[in-house]
Image (cartoon, rainbow, N blue to C red):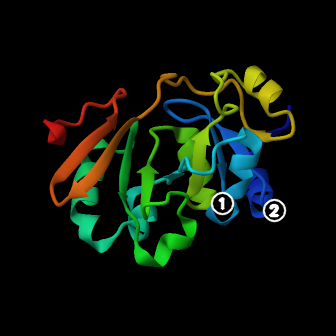
């Protein structure tokens, strides 16, 4: 097991390698956006499945949101972030290089986790996925994750802060003021009712 701090994690990420870290929901594997292919390789993930762009605060992610959805993004973000909510939203035209979806959308999230936010204050936004091999239930312990990903550095210190162990709620922006539920999680979004 390779435990690292935020400064060492940044060096690893800049080399194009992923880092595993705790969030408020499930442990995540993340990379700098320009190296998104590395997560697909490590997880053995289908390349048609998009990744989530996590940040430490709203303003870190706003430039990734298409102009048509910015007002709704800011409204939902101000109410539910940081927290276990992922917004799938049209991506800004200038950020399409970071897309991992085929429909020009991007999943955005700010976890309610001191560790995750501290990391992303150092690194900037990270493309992420849950820290498991695709198709298998992942471990929620550092020791179990280290067995699944023996060569990937893990952000310390350990033990990690407590997390829910449940996936985030996912909502999809359809048009101004209109969101659709994709996956129910811990967060109940009143705007869907």
Q: Position of residue 2 (x, y in %)?
A: 85, 37
Q: State the residue at coordinates (64%, 28%).
A: 135
Q: Say if 182 sits above or below 9 in the image.
A: above
SS for callout 2: loop
Q: Residue furthest bottom?
A: 94
Q: Position of residue 127 (x, y in %)?
A: 58, 54
23 relative position to 63: left or right = right
The reply to whether callout 1 and callout 2 are in contact (CB within 8 Å) is no
Rendering quarter of residue 104: bottom left
Q: State the residue at coordinates (43%, 67%).
A: 64
The tally of labels here is 2
The numbered dot on residue 15 is 2
Q: Say if 170 sits above or below 158 in the image.
A: below
Q: State the residue at coordinates (37%, 28%).
A: 185
Mark positioned earlier in the residue sequence (1 or 2): 2
Viewer-side residue, 161 vs 64: 64
SS for callout 1: loop
Give the Cα separation between the discs numbered 1 and 2.
9 Å
Q: Position of residue 23 (x, y in %)?
A: 55, 36
The quadrant the C terminus occupies is top left
Q: State the residue at coordinates (74%, 57%).
A: 13
Neighbor class of circle 1 (other Cα within 10 Å; few <14, some 14-19, many 20+) is many
Q: Position of residue 148 (x, y in %)?
A: 78, 28
Neighbor class of circle 2 (other Cα within 10 Å; few <14, some 14-19, many 20+) is few
Rendering quarter of residue 26: top right
189 relative position to 158: left or right = left
The quadrant the N terminus occupies is top right
28 relative position to 143: left or right = left
Q: Say if 30 sits above or below 147 in the image.
A: below
Residue for badge 1: 32
């Amino acid at each position: 097991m390779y435990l690292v701090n935020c400064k060492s994690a940044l060096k690893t990420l800049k080399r194009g390698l992923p880092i595993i870290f705790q969030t408020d929901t499930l442990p995540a594997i993340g990379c700098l956006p320009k190296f998104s292919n590395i997560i697909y390789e490590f997880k053995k993930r289908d390349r048609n499945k998009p990744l989530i762009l996590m940040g430490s605060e709203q303003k870190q992610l706003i430039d990734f949101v298409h102009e048509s959805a910015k007002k709704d993004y800011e409204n939902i973000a101000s109410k539910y972030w940081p927290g276990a909510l992922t917004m799938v939203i049209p991506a800004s035209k200038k950020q399409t290089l970071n897309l991992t979806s085929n429909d020009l959308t991007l999943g955005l999230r700010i976890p309610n986790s001191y560790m995750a936010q501290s990391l992303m204050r150092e690194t900037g936004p990270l493309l992420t996925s849950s820290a498991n091999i695709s198709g298998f239930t992942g471990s929620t312990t550092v020791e179990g994750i280290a067995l699944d990903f023996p060569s990937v550095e893990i952000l310390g210190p350990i033990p990690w802060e407590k997390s829910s162990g449940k996936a985030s709620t996912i909502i999809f922006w359809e048009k101004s003021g209109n969101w659709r539920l994709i996956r129910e999680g811990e967060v109940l979004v009143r705007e869907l009712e």
